[in-house]
Image: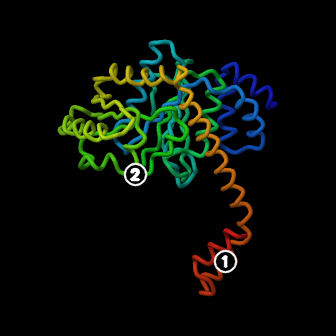
Amino acid sequence: MQDDTLAARVLKGDRRAIARAMTLVENGEKDADKLLAVLGRKTGRAFILGITGPPGTGKSTLVDRLVSEYRKKGVNVGVIAVDPTSPITGGALLGDRVRMVQHTLDKGVFIRSLASRGWSGGLSGAVSEVIQILDAAGTEVILVETVGIGQSDIEIMNVAHAVMVVTMPGLGDDIQVSKGGLMEIGDIYVVNKSDLTGADAMVINLFGIVRGMKGRSPAVLKVSALNSQGIDVLFAAVEKVRTKFLSPEGQEMRLRSIKGIMMDLAKRRMVDAFEKRVNKHIPLLVDKVAEHRLSVEEAARKLAEA
């Protein structure tokens, strides 16, 4: 299959071509860069919403509910679900089959699970590329659900136009939510599982934190995704942010996302190039450290200078 043919099919919204393109970039195949060079010039229309927060807060169920709401409006949706990595295969431990089963036959929804593969910030190394593929294919809304590693799960803010932070009662005191910068990145804060004890107190605490933000007024909502309670209000809050993105006022959001995706791609290319360059030096340096001829810090410095 020629790259220009694959790109043309992606641009037409061909689901098989989209899936093939995603596999190509996730596996780092040699033709991926040429494909993205074509598709990357056809992006910029999709609204990207990041969904982050600690594990167990019900992010996947909330994503499922948002997909349903968008499909009622006839909006095409892409879902990128970043999952933990299998230590055996390197693939995603959770996959499409256990997520959003009701949407799998809907041609207006494309769901892709990606392995985090140890990449920092709760994102997979291929998220930026997959976003570009879905965007170029004409997807109107892209929902990126991060792996949910809690305190360091904030990198999504660099590539998304807006971020929804999901929490729930029982995580600890109100400070728990603000750790790791989560309170600095959210446009919408959701207290899920609102039927649990402590939900109202958590909402009050969040309101108190949000009121202290200068120049920002994030929404704070209480929902129960499992019971579909408050989903209409949540959807309205997301649409309010998307409306801003679609207006001239959204230029700042678009530029921030472009910068984030560009930096993400550049950093990974630098890391890949560094690893290829220094691999041959590692065994000798390891031996020297083991023989106490070098400290770990000295070896690391030599590796950086190699």
| Location of residue 26 (image quadrant) | top right
Q: Say the numbered circle drawn on residue 285.
A: 1
| Spot occupied by residue 27 in the image (x, y as percentages of width and height) | 67, 44
Q: Identify the disc placed on residue 30.
A: none
For the C terminus, the image quarter is bottom right
7, above or below 172, in the image: above
Q: Earlier in the sequence, mark 1 or mark 2?
A: 2
**Tag nearer the camera, 1 or 2:** 2
**In this view of the protein, which residue sits in the foreground, 265 or 2?**
265
Circle 1 crowding by C-alpha within 10 Å: few under 14, some 14–19, many from 20: many
User: In percent of the image, x 25 and y 49: which residue is there?
Assistant: 172
Is residue 282 placed above or below 198 in the rendered structure? below
Kind of residue indicated by mark 2: Gly
Circle 1 sits in a helix, a strand or a loop, which is it? helix
Q: Classify the position of the N terminus by image quarter.
A: top right
The image's mark for residue 180 is 2
Q: In the figure, is residue 173 to the left or right of 284?
A: left
Q: Quadrant of residue 185?
A: top left
- Give the quarter of the image for residue 2: top right
Q: Residues within 10 Å of mark 2 (few under 14, many from 20)?
A: few
